[in-house]
Image: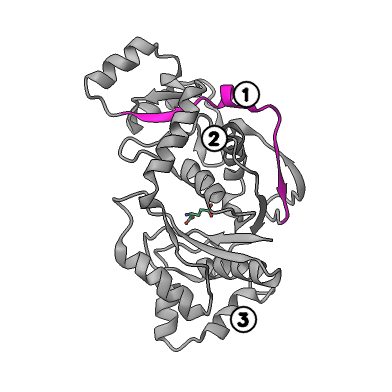
């Protein structure tokens, strides 16, 4: 049975791009007699708002999508993230990182050759070699710290990995894609202000919810490399992936939550019907 999910963050109103992702996940499950789930990715308390979470439910219902209740809220899942973190810690794969953004930028600027990932230069590993005593001393003194995954070590533990890609629009990669775990450097798995991170919570919850096929926009294709690594070192099952194209604006740019005119809310208020939304985003010629 195919189990899919739609996993928005309630940091703004849903737009056409979200509608495309939600409809893709919904229809993939429904066409195969599977199950479509909803997950509210609200670990970042400073950016998420309850009214946006309510609006997600309303907008999806308006689109005519039905998901298996209840929706999972990540803000209620910190216990599970903590236990995943201790599994990583027990394997010696984590280290505390005390760097500020400014310090990281300085280190990168100073380096002769800073490795770059899909989102720019990657963390230069400044705190990776802090000795244990120094780390403990700083923590004891109350210094704020994030936890990072030692990706090289995690990768050595996991061995060569791949993931099964059924979509693959961004680079035309379909089938078994070899994992490049160093793509993002040593990723944060627990932030200074939040005891989890996007990558960690996604893999823990995809497994918890029994998601068998992750359908999502191809802007997250490269994130799959590190998420697959996390699954392997956490001993979690491996879902299939189907990354899909993005809905673009009239300038060919990815829609963002700041594009108010294309929120489902404003389209609805201007008289657009759910059927027209479907036609608009599914028409192959549009994007
Ligand atoms: N919460 C993420 C977003 O809104 C999506 C996570 C995912 O599909 O893996 O972009």
For the C terminus, the quadrant is bottom right
Q: Determine which residue is flagged by label 3.
A: 279
Going from N to C along the chain, the mark reached first, 2 or 1, is: 1
Q: Is residue 147 left or right of residue 184?
A: left
Colouring method of the image: one colour
Q: CA distance from mark 1 to mark 3?
A: 47 Å
Callout in the foreground (1, 3): 1
Residue 128: give x, y in percent of width and height: 45, 19
Front residue of 184/261: it is 184
- Magenta-tinted stretch: 145-166
Is 204 one of the magenta-colored residues? no
Q: Is residue 253 visible?
A: yes
Q: Residue furthest right?
A: 175
Going from N to C along the chain, the mark reached first, 3 or 2, is: 2
Asked whether mark 1 lies closer than 8 Å to ligand 1, one says no
Q: Determine whether 144 is above or below 62 in the image.
A: above
Is 164 one of the magenta-colored residues? yes
């Amino acid at each position: 049975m195919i189990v899919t999910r739609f996993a928005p963050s309630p940091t703004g109103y849903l737009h056409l791009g979200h509608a495309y992702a939600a409809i893709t996940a919904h229809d993939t499950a429904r066409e195969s007699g599977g199950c479509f789930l909803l997950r509210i990715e609200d670990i970042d308390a400073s950016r998420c708002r309850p009214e946006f979470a309510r609006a997600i439910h309303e907008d999806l219902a308006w689109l005519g999508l039905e998901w298996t209740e209840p929706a999972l809220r990540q803000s209620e899942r910190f216990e599970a993230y903590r236990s995943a973190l201790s599994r990583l810690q027990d394997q010696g794969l984590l280290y505390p990182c005390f760097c500020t953004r400014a310090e990281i930028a300085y280190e990168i600027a100073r380096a002769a050759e800073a490795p770059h990932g899909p989102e720019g230069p990657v963390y230069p590993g400044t705190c990776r070699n802090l000795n244990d005593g120094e780390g403990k001393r700083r923590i004891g003194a109350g210094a704020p710290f994030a936890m990072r995954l030692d990706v090289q070590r995690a990768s050595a533990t996991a061995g060569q990995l791949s993931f099964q890609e059924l979509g693959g629009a961004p680079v035309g990669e379909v089938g078994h894609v070899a994992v490049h775990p160093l793509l993002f450097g040593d990723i944060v798995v627990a932030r200074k202000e939040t005891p989890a991170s996007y990558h960690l919570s996604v893999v823990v919850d995809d497994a918890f919810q029994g998601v068998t096929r992750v359908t999502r926009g191809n802007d997250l294709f490269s994130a799959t490399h590190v998420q697959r690594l996390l699954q392997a070192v956490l001993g979690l099952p491996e879902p299939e992936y189907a990354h899909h194209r993005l809905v673009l604006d009239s300038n060919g740019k990815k829609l963002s939550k700041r594009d108010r005119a294309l929120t489902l809310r404003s389209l609805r208020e201007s008289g657009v019907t759910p059927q027209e939304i479907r036609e608009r985003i599914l028409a192959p010629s549009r994007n």
